[in-house]
Image (spheres, rainbow, N blue to C red):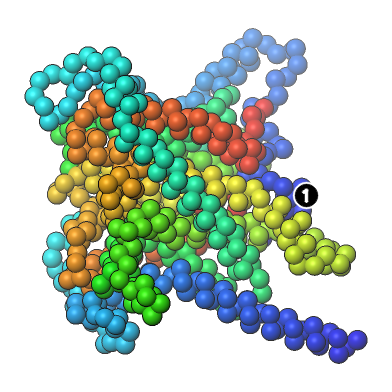
Amino acid sequence: MPTPWARTTGSRLPATSTETTVRASPPAGGGGRTRSAASASAWDGRLRWLPLLPALIYVVLVTQVPFLLTIYYSLFNWNLLRPGNPEFAGAQNYLTVATDPSIRTALFNTVLLTVLAVGISVVLGVAIALLLNKEIFGKGVLRTLMIGPFLVMPVAGALIWKDTLLNPIFGLVGWLLSPIGLGRVDWVSQFPMATIVTIEVWRWTPFMMLIVLAGLQSQNLEVLEAAGVDGANALQTLRYITLPFIRPFVELGALLGSLFIVQTFDSIFMTTQGGPGEATTNLPFLLYLVAFQGFDIGKASAIGVIAVILTMIVATFALRTLFTIFHVEARR
Amino acid sequence: MSRAVTVAKAGQGRSKVGWSALAWLVAFVFFFPVLWMMLEALKTESQAASIPPTIFFVPTLTEFQEVLSRDFPPFFINSAVATIGSTLLVIVLGLPAAYALSIRPVAQARDVLFFFISTRFLPFAASLVPLYLLARDLQLLDNVFALILIYTTINLPLGVWLLRSFLLELPNELFEAARVDGAGFWRELTSIVLPLITPGLAATCLICLIFAWNEFFYAVNFTSSVAATTPIFLVGFISGRGLFYAKLAAAATLASLPVLLAGWFAQKQLIRGLTMGAVK
């Protein structure tokens, strides 16, 4: 669908929220305003909050209040499996967490998994989107097939990979690789991190591909034709016109992808259970172990607070990028 | 001259075949695990775990019947209740909120939007422990109602964002005309917004459906038997050692089918939703 923004700068996503017209209240009319009009508009300003309140109160109740409680609990020595009341422990949980090598391993695994999975799926996603944007047979069918992995329930996908594809005895991958002597490799336990990364890349590449493909399809064909007329070859057109054009789409995909992949839990739970040892224990899985296997409320809360601080550092930057991509501007 | 054009055309045709072949190969590789899941589901247990793998076989629905006649349906129903309930709640809470962030925006619309979307990316570690303790104290553990509330929390920020971007597309004149006629919030919402925003609502619902249906972390920690959802049924296969591949595949297929079909049939809405409303 041709959209006006595609023809203009072409460096930012369609600004769904960039409004030239101001829908908000009519401009405050000069100095001639009477007091009653002013108070009426103040009243209107307050009325505008009404439709917002239910959602706002709900979100504050289920995210902000619990977070304050998380901070509070993190100061207590409290295990649900041990009898007795919680005891105030000050910063003890934080000291335990700071000196616990498991946390550092989990942190490292989280970063490794996120960087690898996002990096590989972005590169593959862009390549496949460029491929599906060419003049080829059966585009619609191909896109339908490609998004399958993203739509399959992650728990189901992980099970299928672990049992029917990567199993050393019955797995299809082993059977396919047996001619080159890799038949009996137990992928899940010998290469646990690579297995998780593979499953996540398989799941998120279609996501990246969809976003980039949507961007490519909004590209102005005239610009490409003009480049061809000016004698640019395919590689030059790709390097200097197409890639800069899809850059905001790639940024959006990478951003959303990282925010989701950082929280990876399903595929780890279903394949390696964080092991062998701690080889695939990331922060979400560690939290699960501490909170729901150890029932250590204090320590789990401390991990929660640390995870939030780390996320805030990354997310402030990420959200700013998001808002720039979307041109979310203050109105009036 | 004309010969040169023909040669160029022929070259284009050749490259079209070449690129098509490559594209089909890549798509096949990515789709293969999905296809294999469905094929294994149509086999008998001995065919499903054979070496070399059984490629040609007479499809059977035995394993589907087996799964459906056993304990699978309650899990499926719990998933449906949690998904539909939370999606409805997202729309009921999110649509008025989106209205107050777009059509008659509050003064701090940008900050509120920032706040909403930031909660979507808060790690679940932030509120997990208090929510768990609260659910325990209110007897809401292993209760679908708790899942509805949690999935609403997960989907509401994205829902507000998406609905807002759809509302912004409605032409301004509509609301001006309605205001001249003296229409209030409810009239505007029911007679202008709802009829015109149907595609946007569909996209929002689809995204909510996907995230709620596939959700696992809270499902596995907040439910045990009564309220357990479809992914929890699959956890039962976790230690499978080649004995129940066909059953596993049948259950995995049934679990994935609602979202697969919804996503395939509504690809346009899926793309709009996944790009957060940016691509039309």
In the image, residue B229 above or below residue A55: below
* Residue B142 screen position, x and y as percent: 17, 43
Residue A272 horizontal side relative to residue A114, left or right: left
The quadrant of the image that shows the N terminus of chain A is bottom right
Q: Residue at x 38, y 69 (%)?
A: B33
Instruction: For label 1, count other residues whose C-alpha is less than 10 Å away and answer few (under 14), some (14-19) or many (20+).
Output: few
Residue A58 horizontal side relative to residue A323, left or right: left
In the image, residue B110 above or below residue B66: above
- Would you identify the image quadrant in which residue A65 lies? top left
* Residue A215 screen position, x and y as percent: 64, 56
Residue A51 horizontal side relative to residue B69, left or right: right
In the image, residue B54 above or below residue A268: below
Q: Looking at this rendering, what residue extends furthest in the front direction? A: A181
Residue placed most toward the observer, A260 or A13: A260
In the image, residue B183 above or below residue A98: below
* Residue A189 screen position, x and y as percent: 29, 58
Q: Residue at x 17, y 27 (%)?
A: A79
Q: Residue at x 64, y 48 (%)?
A: A248
| Amino acid of disc 1 | Thr
* Residue B191 screen position, x and y as percent: 51, 45
Residue placed most toward the observer, A72 or B259: A72
- Tell me if residue A3 can be seen: no
- Tell me if residue A309 can be seen: yes
- Would you identify the image quadrant in which residue B91 lies? top left
The quadrant of the image that shows the C terminus of chain A is top right
Q: What residue is pinned by disc 1?
A: A8
Residue placed most toward the observer, A61 or A153: A153
